[in-house]
Image: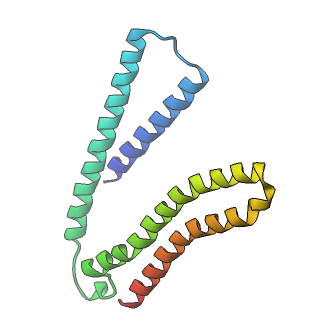
Amino acid sequence: MYWLLALITGSLLLLIGLGIHYEIHPLPANHSTQRRLKSILAFNLITFILAQLGLLLLGIQEVMAAPTGPETVHDISIGMGLAILGIGIPTAFSTIGAGIAVGPVGAASLAVIAEKPEMFGRTLLYLGLAEGIAIYGLVVSILLLGKI
């Protein structure tokens, strides 16, 4: 299984290295060069996806074949693991929503403050309301955590 991790790591490092190299030394706009780079990228992407699927399948097989006995008494069950993942979902989605809300509100706030500095308090209030979305998700997660 470690060879799959090495393959995934090598694939990512090759992709990052090629990106840095071609950012520093751009290629001429040659049709054959672009086709070669697209084929290299496609091969790298296919290798990465196949290695991820192999790692997933081998990992599932290894976990399912784990011995059960008195030494695994303190393990978390599948149901408990899914419950903990479900508890994290409100925080994740509310944080993403807050990020989406704060972007335009913050940009508009800076534009308004540049023209009318006396509007600072009102724009800060709107930004706080947008950030409150993340707090609501955190509160819901904490309440759900208390139900376990």
Assign the N terminus to one quadrant of the image.
bottom left
Compared to 146, does 68 lie above or below? above
* Residue at (29, 84) in percent of width and height: 72
Q: Quadrant of residue 83?
A: bottom left
Name the one closer to the observer, 114 or 3.
114
Marks counted in the figure total 0
Residue 77 in sight here? no
Assign the C terminus to one quadrant of the image.
bottom left
Q: How is the image coloured?
A: rainbow
Left or right of 56: which side holds 91? right
Left or right of 107: which side holds 42? left
**Percent coordinates x, y for residue 133 in the rendering:** 51, 70
**Percent coordinates x, y for residue 94 in the rendering:** 46, 67
Q: Quadrant of residue 37?
A: top left
Residue 72 in sight here? yes
Compared to 83, does 59 lie above or below? above
In the picture as drawn, the residue positioned furthest to the right comes out as: 117
**Percent coordinates x, y for residue 144 in the rendering:** 39, 84
Name the one closer to the observer, 94 or 33.
94
Name the one closer to the observer, 126 or 141.
126
* Residue at (33, 41) in percent of width and height: 48
Left or right of 88: which side holds 18? right
Compared to 73, does 26 lie above or below? above
Compared to 134, does 49 lie above or below? above
